[in-house]
Image (spheres, rainbow, N blue to C red):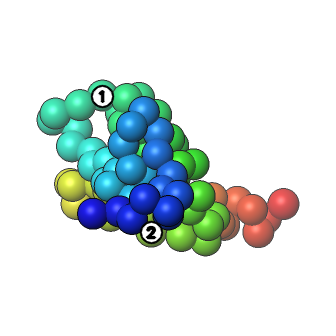
Amino acid sequence: MTPTNVSVPTIGGQILSEISLPTFSSREQSAVHFLKDLDEYLKLKSVDERLKLTLVSKSLTEEFVKTGLWQLKNILTVMKSLK
């Protein structure tokens, strides 16, 4: 139970610490909806830029999607170094 003299951040009546990381399964949901939920989560939790990719990876439930994410990250890193 939260003491009455402590301010607890809420949104829509939900305590922010209770918001869980959204998960993605390509069989169950739209990628667009997942990305919107994930973006909202990262903003509400004020996640540091250096941790975002790790959290995104943890939110993916299928290994082939995780593999694709890391391959894309590597491609973008190489492209950035060629600039």
Residue pictured at 15% horizontal, 35% vertical: 27
Q: Quadrant of the C terminus?
A: bottom right
Q: Residues within 10 Å of mark 2 (few under 14, many from 20)?
A: few
Q: Secondary structure at mark 1?
A: loop
> x, y percentage for residue 24?
27, 45
Residue situated in front as seen by the camera: 37 or 73: 37
Q: Quadrant of the N terminus?
A: bottom left
> x, y percentage for residue 42?
52, 52
Mark 1–mark 2 distance (CA, rounded to whole Å): 21 Å
Which residue, as the protein is rendered here, is positioned at the far right?
83
Q: Secondary structure at mark 2?
A: helix
Q: Is residue 58 left or right of residue 29?
A: right
Task: Residue 5: give its label.
Answer: none
Judging by the rendered image, the residue that carries numbered circle 2 is 54
Residue pictured at 47% horizontal, 39% vertical: 11
> x, y percentage for residue 82?
79, 64
Q: Quadrant of residue 21?
A: bottom left
Residue pictured at 43% horizontal, 52% vertical: 16
From where the camera sits, is residue 39 visible? yes
**Tag 1 near tag 2, CB within 8 Å:** no
Amino acid type, residue under disc 2 in the picture: Thr
Q: Is residue 23 left or right of residue 49?
A: left
Q: Residues within 10 Å of mark 1 (few under 14, many from 20)?
A: few
Q: Is residue 9 left or right of residue 61?
A: right
Residue situated in front as seen by the camera: 8 or 22: 8
Q: Is residue 27 left or right of residue 82?
A: left
Which residue, as the protein is rendered here, is positioned at the far front?
4
Amino acid type, residue under disc 1 in the picture: Ser
Task: Residue 30: give its label.
Answer: 1
From where the camera sits, is residue 65 visible? no
Residue pictured at 27% horizontal, 49% vertical: 23
